[in-house]
Image: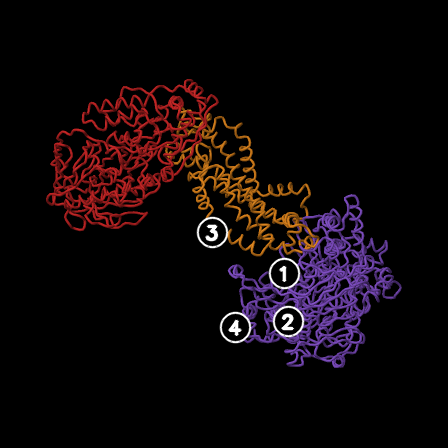
Chain colours: A orange, B red, C purple
Amino acid sequence: MATSLASSQAAQGKPSRRLRVLKSLFERRSAAFGTTVVLFFLLVALLGPLLAPYGANEQILSEARQPPSLQRPFGTDHIGRDVFSRVVLGARDIFVLAGVGTLLAVVAGTIIGLLASYLGGLTEELTFRFFDSVLAMPALLFALLLMGTFGPSRGNVLIVITVAYIPIVARVVRSVVLPVKTKDYVAAARMQGEPITRIIFREILPSVLPALAVESALRFSYAIFLVASLGFLGAGVQPPNPDWGLMISEARTFVSLTPWSLYFPAAAISLLVISVNLMADGLKSVLQGQA
Amino acid sequence: MPTPYARASQEAPPVTPSFLARVLRSAGPVTVILAVASLFMGTAAVAQVGTLRVAIEPPVQLDPAFASSDSEIAVLNSVYDYLIDIDAQNDIQPRLASDWTVSDDGLRYTFRLAEGVTFHDGSALRAQDVVWTFDRLRDPSLELPTSDLYANIADITTSGELEVTFTLHQTNPFFLYDLSDNHALIVKAGTADAGTNFNGTGPFRVDDYRVGTRMSLSANESYFIDGKPGVENLELIFFSDQVAAVDAIRGGQVDLVLRMPTPLFLTLQAEPGIEAVSVPTNAFDLVRLRADRPPGDDPRVQQALKLLTDRDAIIEAVTLGLGAPGKHSPIGPLYSQYFAEELEVPEPDVEQARQLLAEAGYEDGLELELHTPDTGDRPTLAVVLKDQWARGGVDIEVIVQPESVYYSDGGWLDVGLGITGWGSRPIPQYFLDVMVACDAVWNEAHWCDEEVDRLIEVAGTTLDDEARAEAYLEIQRILLERGPLIIPYFFPQFGAIRETFENFELKAFPGRSDLAAIQVR
Amino acid sequence: MIENLSVAYDQGGHLQTVLRDIDLTIEPGQAYGLVGESGSGKSTLALAAMRSLSGSGRIGGGSIELAGVNLLDLDPEEMRLLWRSRIKLVPQDAGSSLNPRLKVGRQIAEGLDLVGRQRQASVHELLGRVGLADPLRVANSYPHQLSGGMQQRVMIAMALGGTPELLILDEPTTNLDVTTEATILDLVKDLLRERNTAVLYVSHSLGVVAQLCDRVAVLYAGELVEDATVEGLYNTPLHPYTRGLLDSVPQIGKDRRREELRPVTGSIPEPGALPAGCVFAPRCPLANDFTRENRPQLESAGLSRRVRCHRWQEVAEGAVSPRQPGRDAVHAGTAVMDRAGELVLEVSELEKRFPLRRGLGELIAGRPAAAVSAVAGVDLSIRRRRTLGLVGESGSGKSTLARCIIGLITPTGGSMKLLDIPLQPRLSQRGEKVLRRLQMVFQNADEALNPYLTVGASLRRPLERLAGASSADLGERLAALLEAVRLSTDYADRYPSELSGGEKQRVAIARAFASEPDLLLFDESVSGLDVSVQASILNLLSGLQLERESAYLFISHDLAVVGYLADEIAVIYRGQLMETGPTDAVFEPPYHPYTEALLSAIPLLDPTVRKERIRLRGENGAPAGSSTDAPGGCPFHTRCPRFLGAICVNEDPPWQEHESGKRIYCHIPLAELELMQERPVASSSRSGTELDD
């Protein structure tokens, strides 16, 4: 491990590093597929309104319950909304909620994880015992509990993802910090009288980053799933937002009348979650395999 | 709000607290003689064969005094009996009471009980059991949901083993309907654990109850109505998900589903071997704006929202064309003798609505939160309204909440703009008394129109049916013209039964459907 | 046995040759040493000799014969049989070679062809043979229940199991304490004596090989450069590389004032970037145009002696010296060194007790924890321009002591003064002025530098923070700092992973010197390095001390290394000083019995001096009898070879002053000690005491 770290860190900071990671990522077939799909969805999310021929809640009753066709590639739902437009516009929702939620969790989890495990002692003990107790509950259950308490809204979905994933991220961070914090270069920094913030962020954080990159991707895929699950259970984003989970929930009773309004958002979720996972897997083997 | 709302079935706001405060000034002699014999036609005891498996939602609790949801009533209606029952046409029918008389002053109702009725523990039904049951239901100190409903009862007495007399404080033309209330199942006198011992007189005995999973019942062979029950075993299987229940009947794991959403009904209609049935009801979804605070306190805003609502499109989109058109009043076409057939809902007029809004000071548009429970077609209605009202510059944010949450702690009475599902009732006066009248307990719109209030008073007290019809007509005219209530449709109830069974009649309140009548074909 | 062997590693498609044309013959009963710096290919050769190279290794050509059978012709099944009985390997890290989930007795038994009771007896016999006192208990232990030395003995027992014809030992004592190493070496020696096994002993330690082996092969960059009997090689090395290695080893009695180390400069070339001519030419003091362009052959240089050098004859005749050039600066500074300056550090009664870990409940209840004493009342003082050497085995508390001084660990008692000003125990309480005066260099070069920061970034920070360098002269001072540790300025842009171990340690030293500290602590700072690198670092430290006039606290388990650099030496055992005094005095009798054992354990470079040794019972980490707290009386009594009796157990020994200026913490009167003990180095006829049980 020590040698693998050392050599993978050789290129750290050089401008080509990110490109090299990306290149290695694309050399693996499944990771290349995953990354491409994720980037594709990201593009869809960014360009959403330009790609969608109809509004998310635009109802043309006379065209309700139409099967997929050239004009309506994904068909229309029971109240005449264009399923394709809704899936396209929903991509942004997923990326904003799952993405920002994950980002917040990663940032907060990293800071807490770094601080608590660097300080050690009672701080670390209490923090992680508390996190352990939070983790004893499945994320979805935890999320439903919070949503039930604070009421369903986009902001709360964001908070829920953040709160649910902070302990997980913090634990990953801790697993890297514990061996690193006893390294001599950290002691050397302390002997230079460096402030704790600098020791944590400059000396320790870089070692955490590879593990964090993989964990972030993984968290992101779980967050997508969580957002969709909350939407499906009616505890997340509110109708008529084109949230994929909500779309599935709405379309569920129509499964025999307008199956397309169920299948397309379901396929979008599956594809994105699988792709993010493939990407995370690839990232993991690239970052570890640079040894 | 007492607890029943938290568990209320989707179309069943709980019992009526106040409309029985109405006074009947004069009471002509009302004698109902019942063609009891008709029930006993073809009485040759049919051997009970087969097992009927029914998909219902898991009951929360099974004390008749508290039960309210369809599934709870379905269980209890199989285990216990009502004194008076209601049929699919909303007409009064005898059950444990084989006949009855009403005194000339309309204050004394005397019921004769059917003979040879026994509880499942073998003891005979006595008049004292009826007295005990209703004394319990009306005891104010117990704070049961029915205490208001039966507050008008002055006294209940017995004369002999099988005769019971109710004495009222004031006359009540709807008293027989009140006695048929969902909670009024006859329990053996002195029963302390009514929720768990299941000692009823009804057509089925409880053999095994697995909370949350299923209940197994078998035919009560000494049931007092010949020919019932029709099946030897009744299996009530609990599904918390209606989609799963429908899947189960398609797959043959259950024989009967008592309730389902519209698209699933359409699906089952095409399914061979399954009879999908629907029954028109007076159940409706009410969209109401609170009239006691801005912006709903401005009649122009109330009017604008009505003009923006495209009722026909809603019926098509939300009820998939199966709903009966509503005219913004709770009196629906089911009450054919009162329904104002000739009134027309104005065509939607976005321009005029915009103008009204502008006059009210909302030329730049209006932002509103629309609260709705998560059951039935209500979320869809909300989403469709969002699109329709957006055309007039009204931007609504839909907030969907679990039904149990929405109806608890009075939140549904509090919100500015909300959708409420109202269950079907046998008489229209109920809705007017509990929802429209100025002092109604559930006047959720917080709207008070003196003219409407006066008309409700008239309709609820007069014994002149013509005068009542006239009052109802005027109320419908006014509610169409003004006020913050939007009632776009009355929805039917849907059920489905496998064709291997017959004699299933779905009632407007599905839980009251008579499972004992069903037989193997 | 091995002929024309070449081995390559498959590195992502292309083969990287790491061993070329190796010829080596080991006779039965012969112990063959294989020495070389890391990267020379000696471990690869050991693995190739038993055909168990890792996945990417490929044997390119040649043959490996075991008693006439070419191993390269055997199929995997036959190889397995061979490994089971005829060739055995004792690896460097016994801890990771043993299966942690199986009792060691079972693991040994698996290698035997016997069954049942006989097998049991055989296991116990093997364990007894490798000097384990209680074979029954050891056989029933899991590996983690055994100390490092015991694990290594178990490995050796396993290897002896099949009565192998060839036993390969790959650095078997590298991770062990000197005293433990000495007992293991004795064991191997005894085993050799009683069996007819051929042994290939791979080691970086010239001393160990000198003491153990009959012949030595020196490996350099994948080539055999010299092959001779130990006497021949050590007395008259022909290859300049051999000469350089020998000159790199510090020896007792040869400190920097008398004789400087002359290590081989530079470093081993990468397998992919070999010079065109002699592979050693870039580092060779005798290199000329001819040797740089022509590759030398392994030539016979007399009776059973081979050397791969164009100029070996000139060396043999004494016409040229194969030694590396010396640096006169060292000698010029001698005078300065003798003038000790003011007192820089004064430590008195320093004590550190580590609480044992408590559960959360105990933590909250504030229950006091049981404690282990790591440093038990130590007094030290160091003067400017002087070096205090601190010697002890692992677990002796020497690192804890250093970390208490530097502030990384808060002591539980005692006081410290820096330049006569009381030193705050906590790092956070010390101002920058204190921090800059006191710096430390750690043992592990790989961990000393942040792998994510360039050398420049790591060095700029202390310059800015502690040395007050302005941004204007930062570049200049950085260059000066690199220059001081003999690194070129372009190192500033490199990452640690691009540096060799020695270079990393130089950067770490540069970082410590950045603030121009008054006191520098070196905690085993040269221990992990190859001898030539170690020697050049020692020279560097010596030079820097002259230039900068700092005081050093130099900590090592290796008395010879400490002796080279230190003016004074303190010997520590289980947190208690055993002996202190001027270097020369410490190396002369009377010794503290512990010092005596340490000195005796040093493997001497001279193969002709094969002295009897003082051996310690038990192991330092796990002294018999006591667990958490040091026993009363002398902490060394549990292992002392000159144990007197109850007095050692019950009473604290007195500090005895000797006329040479040293002090000894022992009950035995100095005169008595002096009578019993002998000088270890100077003369060659030795008799000693075997005190081991």
Give the position of the N terminus of chain B as an image quadrant.
Answer: top left
In the rendered image, residues at marks 1 and 2 fall on the same chain: yes
The x, y position of residue B483, in whole percent, is 35, 24
Label 4 – label 2 distance at C-alpha? 33 Å
Amino acid type at image mark 1:
Ser
Q: Which residue is mark 1?
A: C52
**From this viewpoint, is residue B484 visible?**
yes
- Which of C454/B386 is in front? B386
Amino acid type at image mark 3:
Ala
Q: Earlier in the sequence, mark 4 or mark 2?
A: 4
Which of pointers 3 and 2 indicates the residue nearer the eye?
3
Q: Which residue is mark 2?
A: C619
Q: Which residue is mark 4?
A: C115
The x, y position of residue C375, in whole percent, is 66, 67
Label 3 – label 2 distance at C-alpha? 44 Å
Q: Which residue is mark 3?
A: A136
Location of residue B395 with respect to C607 vertically, above or below: above
Q: Quadrant of residue C186?
A: bottom right
Location of residue B27 with respect to C204 vertically, above or below: above
In the rendered image, residues at marks 4 and 2 fall on the same chain: yes
Amino acid type at image mark 2:
Glu
Q: Residue at x 39, y 19 (%)?
A: B349
- Chain letter belonging to callout 3: A
In the rendered image, residues at marks 3 and 1 fall on the same chain: no
Q: Earlier in the sequence, mark 1 or mark 2?
A: 1
